[in-house]
Amino acid sequence: MSAAHPSGRSVLRGSVEGQRARVALGTLLASGHQIGEALVPTLIGVVIDRAVTGSDSGALVLWLAVLAAVYTGLALSFRIGARSGELAAVRAEHTLRVTLVRRVLSPGGGTEQGRLPGALASIATEDAKRVGAVNLALTLGFSSLVGITTCAVVLLSTSVALGLVVLVGTPVLLWLGHLLSKPLESRSEAEQDRAAHASAIAADLVTGLRILKGIGGEPAAIERYRATSRDSLRATLRAARAQAFQSGMVLALTGCLIAAVALVGGRLAAQGSISLGQLVSAVGLALFLVGPLEVLAWVNAELAQGRASATRIAEVLATAPAVTAGGTPLPQPVRGAVRLAGVRHGGLCDIDLDVAPGELVGVVTTDPAHAADLLRCLSRRGDPDAGSVELDGVPLRDLDPAEIRTAILVAEHDADLFEGTILGNVTAAAPGTSAPEAAMTAAGVTQVSETLPDGEHTAVSERGRSLSGGQRQRVALARALAADRPVLVVHEPTTAIDTVTEARIASGIRELRKGRTTLLVTTSPALLSVTDRVLLIHDGRVTDTAPHADLVRRHEIYRAAVLA
């Protein structure tokens, strides 16, 4: 991980600093609660010595009133302090989640490399929640230390020996608790990794469920998920055992400290060094120590898990972008001239292509992987290994990826729809579009909406699963057309559409995109027939460029690609 990027500790620190005021307020009020809790057994001892032993009714009423006031104060301070700590945790979690989503959706990309979408979702939810919880842990941890300190001061004022037992025993207990949390930290990180992988596999299987059923692959998919789930379960059990061991050991050590306080206090009372009320106070304070010490054990566990989750978050935030923003401004106005010069990327070798502004060009690749490489370069999701891709004479590598998106839209073949309505999906890339009807007509969506109960306002489920494959393709194409970018690149938009409708869509695209640059990366004869010319890429190289009809006559490989 580069030093310029955040570490796990810096993520933890940042999540606290962002909520510093709430953490401070919560700590102050929770500390007041702990001080009040520590004063309760002290006041009970005073009541015994000054009112009960001396049979003074007036003093009894007075000190009971003081005790009631302390109870009221500590109850209010706990309620408000805990609320402030919870708010700090939730706010930090939200901030981390937004930061992660912003990084994942950054035009520079990069975070998706080597990670399934489900893993990123797990990091943005569970890990962000654990790191946010550090704010509450710190609030309660600091207040517990204040409570322990108050207890020690009271015991010191009663007896130096009692105070020293607490002052010496507490740091030793905290140190041992920290050592015991080390295995929990590593096992918690492994637990989150396995859980994220299991979530990613589950999301992947659900997405491809229809395909799995079609090919009869359910048993293999179930076995794959079962194995992943077992790994996740084993990691979770290891983390749970580590947490149980840590909690049990800290609880046992806490009991030893309390027993030591009670033993020393009892000996002092037997020797007459302290009064009966002071003995009662000492035993009460020893019992009070159970609460703060258990909280500190919980805080140690939360910090261990928080550090593990912070490391995972930092790895995502530290991921280098796939492409970096250049300093050259986008040409204004964008004419739409696209040029590829000597491009080498993936399987592409020395690709040269000049597309004039307003030209409609088809691209046929005999290898689907080469089409994916071309789309990656045109959308600048990756820069060519050699050569350049230019827009109006400016290399894309010199432009900001976010600005490129406003000029070039690359509509992938597997573009997903969003949950909402058909109309909402069509206007998603251009919210201000007042008349998307032309795009919907050109893509054949109008014909689809006429057959649906609520027309263009028909609800669409997640990823558009409530629509057929052909319907999803039409809506996705209409969305790309409605965006009205100067340059539009469309990849296989009609593979699930019948030939008659496909021919109408081809004419609609040509009519709607007249005067604007359009590249159709496809093997569809209907779409290629309406282009001005077609570029044939075979074995990663440009083989020929000519109108569709000429290529059909001249090349056997072209006929095999588009007519087979």
Image (cartoon, rainbow, N blue to C red):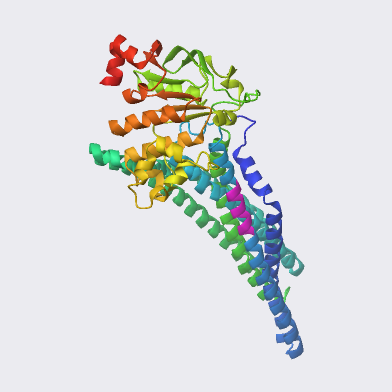
Q: Residue furthest left?
A: 216
Q: Is residue 545 above or below residue 98?
A: above
Query: Residue 164 at what x, y percent from top left?
Result: 71, 60
**Is the C terminus in the top left, top right, bottom left or bottom right quadrant?**
top left
Of the pair 8 and 294, the residue shown nearer to us:
8
Could you tell whether 456 is left or right of 329 in the image?
Answer: left
Q: Is residue 96 above or below residue 390?
A: below
Q: Is residue 545 visible?
A: yes
Could you tell whether 145 is left or right of 384 in the image?
Answer: right
Query: Residue 372 at what x, y percent from top left?
Result: 41, 24
Q: How many marks?
A: 0
Q: Is residue 91 magenta?
A: yes
Q: Is residue 427 magenta?
A: no
Q: Is residue 263 visible?
A: no
Q: Is residue 526 above or below residue 135?
A: above
**Is the N terminus in the top left, top right, bottom left or bottom right quadrant?**
top right
Considering the whole magenta stretch, tell me its main secondary structure.
helix
Could you tell whether 505 is left or right of 65 in the image?
Answer: left
Q: Is residue 332 above or below residue 550?
A: below
Of the pair 86 and 332, the residue shown nearer to us:
332
Query: Residue 9 at what x, y percent from top left?
Result: 62, 41
At a point 55% along the width and 47% down the height, the residue shown is 128
Q: Which residues are magenta?
A: 85-95
